[in-house]
Amino acid sequence: MNPSNPSSSPTPSRKTCRRVAPTLDAFESPDAWLFRFDVPGVADEGLTLRFEAGRLELDAAQTLTEGWAEPLRYIASVPLPEGVDVEAIDASLASGVLTVKVGKSPTLRSRLIEVKKVN
Amino acid sequence: MLSLDRDWRFAHPDMSRVVRELYAMERELWSALDAHRPRTAARRPGLRERLVDEGSALAYHAELPGVAGDAVEVRVEGAMLHLRAERRVDAPEGYKPLRTDRHGATLSRAIELPCPVDIGCVTAELRAGVLSVRLPKVAAAAPRSIPVSIV
């Protein structure tokens, strides 16, 4: 590869990457939602995740498949129900899987109501 | 008068034209609806894997998201590369599933290597869900440039 020629650069710009939707799992508990996205070959620096207008927006560009596979750009836009606790969103990337935990606002959390016995 | 035995579309010479027009209207309607559908990205391709000849070595790569390091087995036997990878997908504790597209699976591969490799020098690593196996070729199989003598 000729380094002086930008068109043959080994890491193509994000625009030229093919966009694909990652496979996704979604779970719910009384306190939170949990999402898992398959994003193999994505490093921390290629990944952006934001919560915007009630949606979870994922943009993850592959950088670790260089030299053997066309780099993909994982794009997902997940609509979230009302009642997201914006301060309680945690994300972690491990083994090519992005896990995002979205906390529910306290008003939405389920609580077991104790029924008093009246005799 | 329409007969039930006969295809109703041919009962009247104009009927097939009407049907054609109806189909055309339906297509138009769908394309109009498509224009308003949010643009979704294409689905992620299935397992991507590749054996690459890098000159002095062969390299096998595969995307294995969610596969733990201890769930991958790489074995070289003669001219064959054997792979076994297991992906376990468990629901997190205390959560109920809303949508599960990711599945647990076992991948088994037996790949015929195009040239002999130095079995003692094979290395494998799993990084961000990508498995890379490097298989250096034996000296006899490594590329060698041959000087051309002009006669």
Image (cartoon, coloured by chain):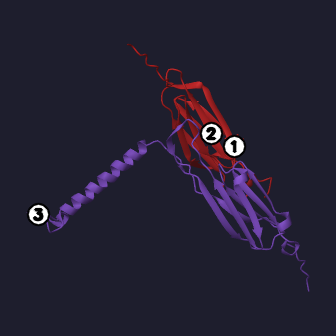
Quadrant (top left, top right, bottom left, bottom right) of the N terminus of chain B: bottom left
Which residue lies under the disc numbered 3?
Answer: B2
For the residue labelled by badge 2, is the local secondary structure a helix, a strand or a loop? strand
Q: Are marks 2 and 1 in contact (CB under 8 Å)?
A: yes
Residue, far front? A119
- Say which quarter of the image contains residue B60: bottom right
Up the image or down, A13 lies above or below B58; here it is above
The purple-coloured chain is labelled B
Task: Check disc 1 and report the residue beneath it.
Answer: A94
In front of the other: A119 or B151: A119
Residue at the extreme top? A119
- Left or right of B25, for residue B79: right
The residue that appears at 46% across and 19% down in the rendered structure is: A114
Q: Nearer the viewer, residue B50 or B109?
A: B109
Q: Mark 3 packing: few (<14 Cα in 10 Å), some, or many (20+)?
A: few
Residue indicated by mark 2: A99
Tell me the distance, in whole angstroms, between the alpha carbons under discs 3 and 2. Answer: 62 Å
Q: Are marks 3 and 2 in contact (CB under 8 Å)?
A: no
Chain that appears red = A
Chain under numbered label 3: B
